């Protein structure tokens, strides 16, 4: 049975630091890797009021309005992890430019990341939603921590590392960081300096394709990938809290492997960018795209259309878009809340509870599936 959300359920929504979007000015920007594909943006509130603290590991939601050459302006919603510990006057995010993939051919580069890298500079103004997200460090615990990052998944880990250095300097922290080589090694000098100054920080850098000039033992410690075999070889025991953020392939293997190793499900915390599905054995799941026994009627109230759900799509957002119904969306993984919709009637199920905190009578289309006939205010 799926995790469900219907219009009669009551879920407490935590108070946000501010509602909607708030204007921020870019104070400066700086590249964090030799290849200049990962850029940090330092953000200050236009109103000059102090910024609320956030939990290390959370993200910001950006509302971007821009026009591609020869096209009408459009709005994109995107979420980016905070990459520095909380301060009252400034936030920082670090964004990797998503290039067009070589396979399959014809797919475009990331629109939002390209916009940041090409058009957002010191003095630019951005509309930003308050920090949110359930993927964050347990600040009440002093259990040794294992942070596992793949590629740009290092961004929330930088925030956690900085927070621990300031507030829990005696807490043992292992960082396993997997990248291809030194050209893509973000925060390299910063991490090496932190490891020298913090006796409790153990740095484990893994290169999958080292450059000729990369030296093992100097630039990196291990060759290959961050996997269970490396963790077993490096960690003395499993009595740690694990936080994992990286590409879908790494997450899909590592999260279940940790559970199979015997790590308690409550000690495994993970976040995947994009619509990756990662599940623990204890999760209640259903195969994506599984046909239903009988078509389910889905009514989109604003567009005045009633369609039949056969179960071929993975979620209601894909279902709507496949029929030409445009719905605002961002992360497509149940985190940002951009595709939230009011349930007029009916029940929506989820493979896994969304990270976004839903108010009573709301559902998320990007990870939700109809369990019965329903109507949506969309």
Image: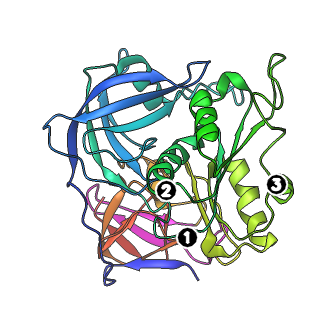
Q: Which mark is first along the chain, 1 or 3?
A: 3
Query: Magenta stretch containing residue 286, yes or no?
Result: yes
Ranked by sequence position, the earlier of labels 3 and 2 is 3
Residue 255 percent across, percent down from the top left:
70, 62
Q: Residue under circle 1?
A: 352
Q: Indicate the secondary structure of the residue bearing disc 2.
A: helix
The residue nearer to you, when weighing 122 against 357, is 122
Position of the C terminus, as image quadrant, is bottom left
Q: Nearer the viewer, mark 2 or mark 1?
A: 1
Total marks shown come to 3
The residue at the point 65 percent across, 26 percent down is: 184
Q: Position of residue 126 (x, y in %)?
A: 27, 32
Q: Which mark is residue 319?
A: 2
What is the distance, in whole Å, between disc 2 and disc 1 at their CAs? 19 Å
Q: Quadrant of residue 358?
A: bottom left
> Callout 2 environment at 10 Å: few (<14), some (14 to 19), or many (20+)?
many
* Image location of residue 376, percent across then percent down: 33, 66
| The magenta segment | 283-310
Q: Is residue 307 left or right of residue 304?
A: right
Label 3, label 1: how far apart the Cα atoms are: 31 Å
Which of these two is toward me, 161 or 39? 161
User: Closest to the observer: 116 or 53?
Assistant: 53
Residue that label 3 marks:
234
Q: Nearer the viewer, residue 213 or 305?
A: 213
Q: Secondary structure at mark 3?
A: helix
- Does residue 12 appear left or right of residue 83 in this picture? left
Helix, strand or loop under label 1: loop
| Circles 2 and 1 in contact, beta carbons < 8 Å | no
Task: Tell me if residue 40 is in the magenta stretch.
Answer: no
Q: CA distance from mark 3 to mark 2?
A: 45 Å
Looking at the image, residue 178 sits to the left or right of residue 48; the answer is right
């Amino acid at each position: 049975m799926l995790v469900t959300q219907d219009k009669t359920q009551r879920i407490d929504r935590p108070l946000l630091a501010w509602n909607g979007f708030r204007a921020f000015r870019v104070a400066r920007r700086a590249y964090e890797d030799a290849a200049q594909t990962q850029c940090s943006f330092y953000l200050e509130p236009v109103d000059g009021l102090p910024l609320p603290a956030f939990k290390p590991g959370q993200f910001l939601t950006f509302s971007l309005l821009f026009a591609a050459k020869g096209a009408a302006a459009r709005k994109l919603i995107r979420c980016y992890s905070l990459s520095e510990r909380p301060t009252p006057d400034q936030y920082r995010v670090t964004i990797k430019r998503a290039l067009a993939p070589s396979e399959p051919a014809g797919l475009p580069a990331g629109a939002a990341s390209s916009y940041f890298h090409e058009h957002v500079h010191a003095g630019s103004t951005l509309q930003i939603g308050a920090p949110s997200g359930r993927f964050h460090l347990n600040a009440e615990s002093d259990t040794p921590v294992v942070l596992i990052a793949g590629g740009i998944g290092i961004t929330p880990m930088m925030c956690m590392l900085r927070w621990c250095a300031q507030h829990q300097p005696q807490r043992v922290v292992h960082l396993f960081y997997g990248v291809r080589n030194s050209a893509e090694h973000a925060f390299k000098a910063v991490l090496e300096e932190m490891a020298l100054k913090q006796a409790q920080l153990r740095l484990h850098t893994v290169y999958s394709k080292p450059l000729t000039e990369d030296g093992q033992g100097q630039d990196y410690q291990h060759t290959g990938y961050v996997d269970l075999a490396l963790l077993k070889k490096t960690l003395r025991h499993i009595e740690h809290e694990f936080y994992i953020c990286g590409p879908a392939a790494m997450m899909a293997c590592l999260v279940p492997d940790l559970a199979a190793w015997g790590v308690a499900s409550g000690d495994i915390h993970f976040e995947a960018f994009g619509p990756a599905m990662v599940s623990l054995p204890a999760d209640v799941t259903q195969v994506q795209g599984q046909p239903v026994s009988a078509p389910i009627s889905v009514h989109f109230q604003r567009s005045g259309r009633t369609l039949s759900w056969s179960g071929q799509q993975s979620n209601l957002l894909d279902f709507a878009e496949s029929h030409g119904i445009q719905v605002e969306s961002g992360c497509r993984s149940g985190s940002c809340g951009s595709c939230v919709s009011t349930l007029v009637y009916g029940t929506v199920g989820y493979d896994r509870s969304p990270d976004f905190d839903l108010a009573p009578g709301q559902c998320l289309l990007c990870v939700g599936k109809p369990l019965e006939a329903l109507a949506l205010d969309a």
